[in-house]
Image: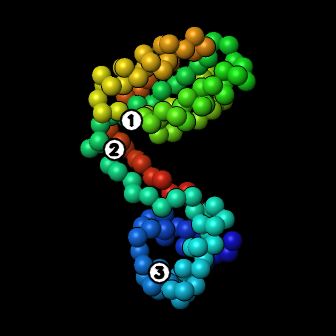
Amino acid sequence: MDGFDRRLLDLLQQDNRRTYDDLGEELGLSATAVRRRAARLREQGVIAADVSILNSDQMGISVIVSVRFEKESHATYEAFKTAMKAAPEVRQCYTVSGEVDFIVIAHFEDLPAYDDWVAETFLSNPAIARTTTNVVYRRVKFDTAIPV
């Protein structure tokens, strides 16, 4: 990956709907060269997806849940990861170090929908010792771009 690739990735993370002509002009490359570079970066998996990011403030509520297990085991972790991957409400899930085992970021239509999900997902799981939920009431900063 060279400097052109890095700058191209930076520009695409800001707005991936720009034309190759427009990107090429900014990069000092032809549109064809930009198209080839972007295609290669997609094929290599550097660009994982081209998506539209919705304004979550207009789409319900977001929650950040810390999950701590009673007894940690490989089977417990794998079962929990499988459940989180399958849950359409879960937007992100991370295994983390520290006092908790997982951080889950999920999105719901409203608080009753979240409450139902908690009962189904966490309260019925005997391996979970404790969860702590933070309801997001205002987004201060949200950026999906990764520095390149």
129 on left or right of 73: left
Q: Check the image and report above or below for 47 versus 70.
A: below
> The disc labelled 3 sits on which kind of residue?
Tyr
Residue drawn at x 49%, y 68% as measured from the top left: 12
Looking at the image, which is closer to me, 51 or 23?
A: 51
Q: Amino acid at mark 1?
A: His
Q: Is residue 50 left or right of residue 74?
A: left
Asked whether 136 or 47 is in front, the reply is 47
**Crowd around label 1: few <14 · some 14–19 · many ≥20 (10 Å):** many
Q: Could you tell me residue 115's position as x and y percent?
A: 36, 20
Which is nearer the N-term, disc 2 or disc 3? Answer: 3
- In depth, the one of 39 and 134 nearer the eye is 39
Q: Position of residue 65 (x, y in %)?
A: 48, 27
Query: Disc 2 marks which amino acid?
Result: Ser
Specify the label residue 56 is tagged with: 2
Give the total of numbered labels.
Answer: 3
Asked where in the image residue 85 lies, by quadrant, the reply is: top right
> Which tag, 1 or 3, sits closer to the chain's start?
3
Quadrant that contains the C terminus: bottom right
Residue where numbered disc 1 is placed: 107
Query: Mark 1: which secondary structure?
Result: strand
Question: Does any portion of residue 26 appear in the rendered image?
Answer: no
Quickly name the residue at label 3.
20
Seen as rendered, the residue at the extreme left is 58
| SS for dot 3 | helix
Q: CA distance from mark 1 to mark 3?
A: 34 Å
Q: Decide: marks 2, 1 in contact (CB < 8 A)?
A: yes
Lower position in the chain sequence, tag 2 or tag 1: 2
Q: Which mark is residue 146?
A: none
Residue at (62%, 21%) from the top-left corner?
Answer: 99
